[in-house]
Amino acid sequence: MLAAIDAGSNTFRLLIGRVADGKVIPELYLRRICRLAGELSSEGGLSPAARKRALFAFMELAEACRQSDVQKVRVVGTAAFRQAINGEAFVAEIREATRLPLEIISGDEEAEYMATGVLSALDPMPPQALIVDIGGGSTEFVLCLHQKVVWSRSLSLGVVRLTEEFTSSSRRQKIIDRTLAELTSELVKTCHALGIDFSGLTLIGTAGTVTTLAALDMQMAEYDWQRVNNYYLPFSRIQHWQSMLISLNTEEREALPGIESGRGDLILSGLEIMLCLMQQINTDSLTVSDFGILEGLLISLHNEVSHS
């Protein structure tokens, strides 16, 4: 049995399973909202409270691996670890306390793993796609042509940072608009250079914001990844949920079927990113993937074990 752990800026997730014919077969999935990027500062790095939450979660996930008799595990830290001045020191502390082989990966590596996981679950497979992973500390953008990654970018446009630093939605929107306008300009030039029809891109979304949105749209009291994979969301439905959620407070949002505790204050920032992106690239629909970096990590680990 193989395992992968994604220590994200908001959520830590564990996937235990196997890979057969390039497809991930999950056996156990656990998630813990730690908000590692909460109160992250350039001077102090990861806060003591965030490190305490994270250490406890890592110990839980390590114990789950031991109980499931996992043969090999890959553990990665993403944006919060990359951005924090004490990120490397905390990695050493986690390794010592849990024996988990935690490593910090780059934004490009994160994008590559994410694309591998998403592409393994898409049905039907679009010939050209823009995959977007809205995370707590960063957002990854990956352009794929015939299942191959041809371009990727990682931007420090994460929902935890946006929510904590900009309480005004109008201020957040200015940052998002400017950042995504620059990204779209680069994407258009890249598509032109590669001979890709920019207007024909299929938009794929993965990670917490979009999977939560899909669960919310289906009024899913108990999360079902199989129903979330390949779920179709029109632009109008995303706008509908933004209008509804903006009128509620955090507790009221988290009382809705589909929104778990710890996401109620972050969901609006994520929706603002997605709606702005859809307007920038002029698309009226979003396909949701529950699969992402975790599944990509498991596939890469399977390939490594198979060839060793």
Image: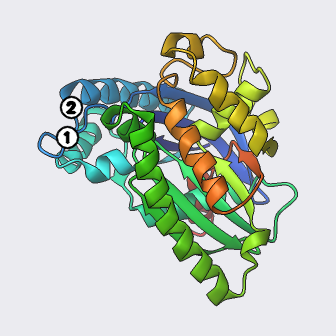
Side (left or right) of 58 relative to 241: left
In the rendering, at what x and y percent does residue 213 appear? 67, 33
Side (left or right) of 113 relative to 130: left
Q: What element does badge 1 sit on?
A: loop
The residue at 71%/46% (across/down) is 289
Three-letter residue code for mark 1: Ser
Q: Residues within 10 Å of mark 1 (few under 14, many from 20)?
A: few
Q: Is residue 255 above or below residue 220?
A: above
**Numbered tag placed on residue 47 in the rendering:** 2
Q: Is residue 64 above or below residue 37?
A: above
Res 294 visible = no
Q: Quadrant of residue 253?
A: top right
In the rendering, at what x and y percent does residue 273 appear? 54, 47
**Numbered tag placed on residue 244 in the rendering:** none
Q: What element does badge 2 sit on?
A: loop
Nearer to me, 88 or 133: 133
Three-letter residue code for mark 2: Ser
The residue at 73%/45% (across/down) is 288
Residue ID for mark 1: 41
**How are the residues colored?**
rainbow
